Image (cartoon, rainbow, N blue to C red):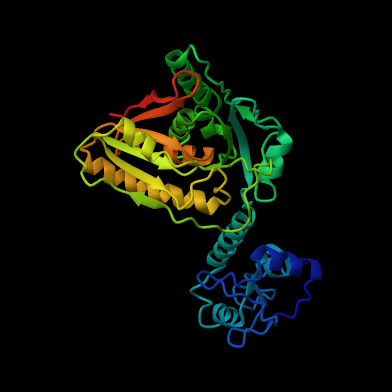
Amino acid sequence: MSNTHIPKDVLHEIWWKAAGRCEFKGCNKPLYKHGVTLDKCKISEYAHIIADSENGPRGDKELSKALAKDPKNIMLMCPECHKYIDNEGKDKYTADVLFDMKKKHEDRIARLTSLCEDLQAHAVTYGAKIGNHQPDLSFHQIQDALLPNFYPVNDIPIDLGGNWPTAKEWDEYWKREVENLEYNCKDKILDKIDRWEYKRIALFSFAPMPLLVKLGTLLNNKHEVEVFQKQRSGGWRWLQEEIHTDYIINRPKYTQSVPVLVLSLSFPIAERIKKHNPNASIWEITIDTPNPDFLKSKQQLYDFGRQVERLLDEITKASNNHPLHLYLSVPVACAIEFGRVWMQKANCPLKIYDLDKQVDNIDRLAITIENKE
């Protein structure tokens, strides 16, 4: 047992570098509680690698005195490991072996304790004025929605643009907006995200449904994306409660016709779609009482995504991978989540429709999304 008086600052340094655990390789025992009773107590011992006496374990005529108070020469150990290396194990565990143990333990502790909890997010906006409604995508609204779970990386969001169609440019509008969205996503996010220190995306969107699905396919589940939903209260903050929704799946009796998927979550639209597609195989996801304000919790959105994943797989198999005709009446976050879980190689190609109230109040093809070869 050492008779050297080791200064308190040296003892403190040894303790915190070892994180209060035995530094003998493979032990790692916490030295601040009893192993049986779990009572808080100090069971640590300070073991000299090169003994502070030349006659001690691994002692040296020149180094013992010089290193007697050097924290680099002292290991934090439990009594069992300390006794072992100074007695039965003194020949097996040389100074070089113990120096290596101490270094690797302290390097591991330093590495683990340097890990910061990643709570940063790049705010991304995609929005257009809908009628007289202009979405508030200001930094103040975004920051309020993110805190306290996440923190914005920058005070200027990444803006992906977004425009609303006019009555005279239906086909031209969708073509132009898809091209703009693809370009902006690639230029502002996809080509740069590998170089970002923080790769999480916080997505705030308010745009036509087909474009939101397209956006979801671009920012798919290969990326970490937190999707937010505009609430009736005016903000984008999710409610804290974990609300669950029982999604209802209505399947067609016959699955060999043209596959159609109707999402009736905001409003019940299945009857309208059936009227214009009398011979189609119509699948539907709905809820007991469709309404535009039902989506208030991230859990509801997560549950929706899992239902969509399973149903898309079922439709793809039943329809022999024929294009799926998609009609949506859903909250914006659900449209994005649909695109994020749709798999470009495994699922049916998509033909997405939108209701053109400015022309003749019918659903018209807006966007086609093909599979990847």
| Rendered location of residue 88, percent (x, y) | 51, 82
Judged left or right of residue 85, residue 76 is: right
Q: Quadrant of the N terminus?
A: bottom right
Residue 355 in view here: yes
Which residue is depicted at the point 55% across and 57% down? 243
| Rendered location of residue 50, percent (x, y) | 63, 70
Residue nearer the viewer, 52 or 302:
302
| Rendered location of residue 14, percent (x, y) | 70, 66
Judged left or right of residue 43, residue 186 is: left
Q: Quadrant of residue 214?
A: top left
Figure check: 30 above or below 96: below
Residue 342 in view here: no
Which residue is depicted at the point 65% across and 50% down? 149
Residue nearer the viewer, 304 or 273:
273
Q: Quadrant of residue 38?
A: bottom right
Q: Quadrant of the C terminus?
A: top left
- The mark total stands at 0
Judged left or right of residue 185, residue 256 is: left
